[in-house]
Amino acid sequence: MDHRATDRHQSLKLAFAILLLAAGCKVVPPPAPPPPTPPPEPERKEAAPRAPPKAAPAAPPKSTAVVPAPAAPRAAAPALDLRSLEQRLKETNAIGVLTKLSLKNQVDDLVAQFRAFHDGRQPPTLTELRRPYELLLMKVLSLLQDSDPALAKEINASREAIWSVLSDRNKLSQFL
């Protein structure tokens, strides 16, 4: 197998792993519309205005010290398992075969851009790569959110870990 074929094979594996991870983006539903306001009451004509009721004398305020609850220990983020996410993405029925192939091509293109960045070719810059990365993740998540919400949630939870792998030359080379 020649060098280009090996690089292509490794690139495809990484691309699919990223695609798997990208499928976990959280899609936030639009906010619920505000509840309808009740119609105004019709004005009534009264003979004479009423005097407001007299308020009872106020008791002196009691000192209420608010003691904040102790902060709960933060759970450690689960370790990133790209291989497992990749396999689950391959096996999910939430995304059709042709769509998976299309996404794989998009992941390959994105990985090629990260390689160009790590090789010192600019553009792209790391800042410029963040947008296509986020868009690809959102696309995968939108495909998974209804039919495979568990995978979507797991990929979304791994969003920053995946970015960390892509943006670090050494970590990226481990997954290729």
Image (cartoon, rainbow, N blue to C red):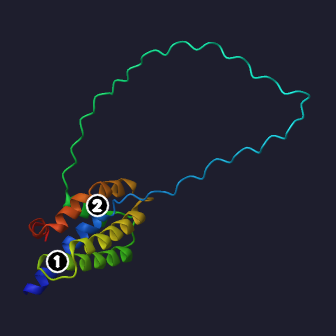
Tell which tag, 1 or 2, sits nearer the viewer. 1
The image position of residue 95, as x and y in percent, is: 39, 68
Which mark is drawn over residue 89? none
Instruction: Tell me which residue sits at (11%, 81%) in the image.
Output: 6
Position of 59 compared to 138: left or right? right
Q: Secondary structure at mark 1?
A: helix
Q: Please tell me which of labels 1 and 2 falls first in the chain.
A: 2
Residue 73 seen anywhere in this rendered image of the structure:
yes
The image position of residue 9, as x and y in percent, is: 16, 78
Q: Secondary structure at mark 2?
A: helix
Position of 51 compared to 133: left or right? right
The quadrant the C terminus occupies is bottom left
Q: Say above or below: 65 vs 42.
A: above
For label 1, the crowd category at 10 Å Cα-Cα, with few meaning under 14, some 14 to 19 and many 20 or more, is: some
Residue type at mark 2? Arg
Position of 19 compared to 139: left or right? left
Instruction: Tell me which residue sits at (36%, 67%) in the image.
Output: 140
Q: Say above or below: 63 vs 162.
A: above
* Residue on which disc 2 sits: 88
In this orientation, which residue lies closer to the viewer: 23 or 74?
A: 74
Residue 5 position by quadrant: bottom left
* Residue on which disc 1 sits: 117
Residue type at mark 1? Phe
Instruction: Tell me which residue sits at (84%, 41%) in the image.
Output: 42
In this orientation, which residue lies closer to the viewer: 38 or 115?
A: 38
Position of 109 compared to 61: left or right? left
The image position of residue 75, as x and y in percent, is: 24, 41
